[in-house]
Amino acid sequence: MKYLILSLLGILIVIGGLSYFGLRNQVMAPIGPDVPSETASLVPVLSAIQPASTSIPSIAATSVPEMASAPVPKVEFLNPLLFQGDTLVGTVSYDNAAPVSASFDSRDIPVLKYQSSYRIVAGIKDIEQVGYHTVSVKFADGATFTEKLYLRARKFPLVDLGVPEKLGVTATQLAQNLEAEQSNLSSIVGIKTANIFFSRGFGLALARNDEIVGPYGEVRKTGSQMIRHLGIDFGSPKGSAVAAINDGVVREAEDDPVYGNTVIVDHGEGIFSLYMHLDSIRTKVGQAVKYGQVIGTVGETGYATGPHLHLSIKINGVSVDPIRFAKIFN
């Protein structure tokens, strides 16, 4: 009878131990729809425990698979060291969804599919405030990327520039005419095609682009007027070939009273190139042009005192430095 009671007590202790150990395992590694059942691995562990044992081998490390980290949207900025007049370009990477919109502070900026990835492109104004600015990208699944970038000041030259007699206007009239023509240009470059026409980087328009007679951002003091030069004047002999800096569609090809013979090429997603003071125009509105295709020749038409090409780049209406733009967008 004594041995029978001891045997029964031993059975109850083992049963109680099994219940305790099973409960503890459930607290440590609960079974859910995405976690494999622990039943098979519990059996050999519990059967190896002796009545006198006080330790429980851990099974969590071998029975619960490690969960992969979720994809995170990223933007690699090709030129994080920013100055006034620059073009900010970033390559977007995110496995879950495509980018649908982007902004520089509160200003919308282009998002485009370029080659094998997505890119964001922001034109930085020549008078953009120095300091931190916020770049944001929104994705189709609701995710958002946000980063602050510091914008540095850039020094622009100041020159005294009188009004040539050949123009037949005063300094005030010159400034007024330029302002009026800017409004006309804005209506053309304000058109935003929802796709891009190019698949390669940008170049420059002349066979030789080393003679700069009017730098980007130059402030020209003309009488009592201060006129900002938002393009680059490239010196070149009259009649030199002027080529499209990338594929696009011609949106303007006519003689402008201020800028002379002018061609404007739409490259898509709000990116435009402008070619001014041409001697001749070799294209027409609506024509598709290719990288390097001749669209005109160097001249001195309009408000010009000598043969040169004025090249401007506008991104969503913002004029940027053409040389820096071509260098970064490759």
Image: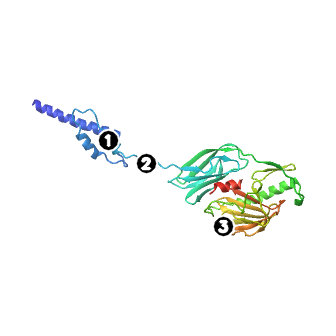
Where disc 2 sits, the SS reads loop
Label 1: which secondary element: loop
**Which of 45/323 is in front?**
323
Which quadrant of the view contains residue 57?
A: top left
- Residue under numbered circle 1: 59
Q: Which residue is mark 3?
A: 290
**Label disc, if present, on residue 68 of the rendered structure:** 2
Circle 3: is it few (<14), some (14-19), or many (20+) Cα within 10 Å? some
**What is the C-alpha distance between the residues marked 3 and 2?**
46 Å
Please report the residue visible at 41 percent of the width from the left and 47 percent of the height from the top: 67
Q: CA distance from mark 1 to mark 2?
A: 20 Å
Name the residue rendered at 67%, 57% in the picture. 326
132 or 3, which lies in front? Answer: 132
Callout 1–callout 2 Cβ contact below 8 Å:
no
Q: Nearer the viewer, mark 1 or mark 3?
A: 3
Three-letter code for the amino acid on which mark 2 is drawn = Ala
What's under tag 3, amino acid-wise?
Lys
Q: Would you place residue 292 above or below residue 49 in this image? A: below
Counting from the top left corner in percent of width and height, residue 17 is at: 24, 35
- In the picture, measured across the screen, residue 2 lies left or right of residue 44, that is left
At which x and y percent is residue 235? Answer: 78, 59
Query: Total number of numbered labels?
Result: 3
Residue 312 visible in the snapshot: yes
